């Protein structure tokens, strides 16, 4: 612990300010100087840890990220993920990080099958930056929902770029950036939407992915990547109609998040 806070006992004085006599006694027994101060707000760290959203206003801004429950919705295109993310965000009064790729494609007038390796770098960075800012924003009250993440971007990169003859190190560069961003993302729940609905042409989607066998193959690829990189994150598959997926998603979120 001392190494993490860069404590130098030869030049600095370490004093623990505590709100409970038991903590003071334990620290004193270990040789630390302590100051016991009576609580001013009638809450404790234990109470905050047990129900962060209830005591959200008492958590200092720099520490709120650590108490935020982050839910990732993933799956192949045109499965109702964006609608689901928006509706869940409204229900829980939570900020939602939508798919940055769609905003990027509209701005640059480029379809799925026209994206270049350079575009995918921007997509990785843009999605992470967007989600990260929402987590640290005042709109965050303990829950943030994301429509996609770096893993999904990597899945599309693999699908569209594997046939490209790049002749350079762009693939290695992308993979290094992907690994760096994925390591920074911390998810508490993954909702994996299965390809059971109809494929909708929104003007930017690659319609070759509308074929059922391609949609299922790509969905399987994403799931294999999830198992490889995010196997330790709680997972719920959503394979019903929209209402069924919505209700199942709420049950899963309620299991990890207590709304105040």
Image (cartoon, helix red, strand yellow):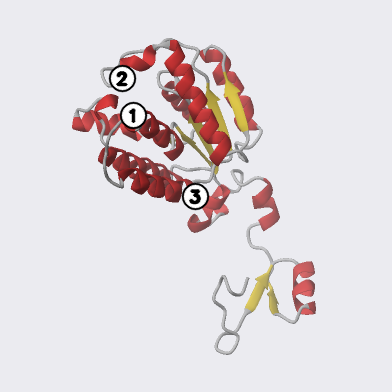
How far apart are the alpha carbons under marks 2 and 1? 10 Å
Above-or-below relation of 107 to 170: above
**Quadrant of residue 149 in the image?**
top left
Asked if residue 174 lies left or right of residue 111, the reply is: right
Q: Is residue 136 visible?
A: no
Residue 191 bears which disc, if any? none
As drawn, the residue found furthest toward the bottom would be 10
- Which of the pair 131/95 is nearer the observer? 131
Question: In terms of sequence position, does the residue under pointer 1 or pointer 3 come before the other?
Answer: 1
Above-or-below relation of 175 to 3: above
Quarter of the image for the C terminus: give it: top right
Residues under numbered marks 2 and 1 in contact, where contact means CB atoms less than 8 Å apart: yes
| Image coordinates for residue 140, horizontal then vertical, percent | 47, 43
**Quadrant of residue 200 in the image?**
top left
Above-or-below relation of 46 to 6: above
Neighbor class of circle 3 (other Cα within 10 Å; few <14, some 14-19, many 20+) is few
| Image coordinates for residue 55, horizontal then vertical, percent | 60, 48
Residue 206 bears which disc, if any? 2
Quarter of the image for the N terminus: give it: bottom right
Residue 160 bears which disc, if any? 1
Q: Which residue is mark 3?
A: 183
- Which of the pair 128/48 is nearer the observer? 128
Residue displayed at 61% across by 47% down:
52
Question: In terms of sequence position, does the residue under pointer 2 or pointer 1 come before the other?
Answer: 1
Q: Is residue 9 visible?
A: yes
């Amino acid at each position: 612990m001392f190494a993490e806070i860069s404590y130098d006992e030869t030049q600095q004085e370490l004093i623990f300010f505590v709100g409970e006599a038991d903590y003071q006694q334990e620290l004193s027994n270990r040789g630390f100087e302590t100051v016991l101060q009576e609580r001013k707000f009638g809450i404790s760290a234990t109470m905050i840890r047990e129900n962060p959203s209830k005591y959200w206003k008492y958590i200092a801004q720099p520490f709120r990220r650590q108490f935020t429950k982050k839910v990732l919705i993933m799956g192949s295109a045109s499965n109702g993920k964006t609608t689901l993310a928006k509706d869940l965000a409204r229900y829980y009064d939570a900020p939602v990080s939508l798919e940055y790729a769609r905003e990027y494609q509209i701005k640059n007038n480029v379809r799925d099958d026209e994206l270049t390796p350079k575009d995918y770098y921007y997509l990785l960075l843009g999605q992470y930056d967007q989600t990260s800012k929402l987590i640290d924003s005042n709109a965050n009250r303990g829950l943030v929902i994301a429509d996609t993440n770096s893993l999904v971007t990597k899945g599309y990169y693999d699908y569209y770029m594997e046939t490209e003859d790049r002749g350079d190190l762009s693939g290695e560069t992308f993979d290094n950036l992907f690994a760096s961003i994925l390591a920074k993302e911390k998810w508490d729940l993954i909702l994996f939407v299965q390809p059971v609905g109809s494929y909708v042409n929104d003007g930017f989607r690659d319609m070759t992915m509308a074929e059922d066998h391609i949609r299922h193959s790509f969905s399987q690829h994403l799931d294999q990547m999830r198992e490889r990189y995010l196997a330790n994150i709680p997972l719920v598959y959503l394979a019903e109609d929209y209402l069924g997926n919505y209700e199942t998603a709420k049950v899963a979120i309620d299991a990890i998040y207590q709304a105040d």
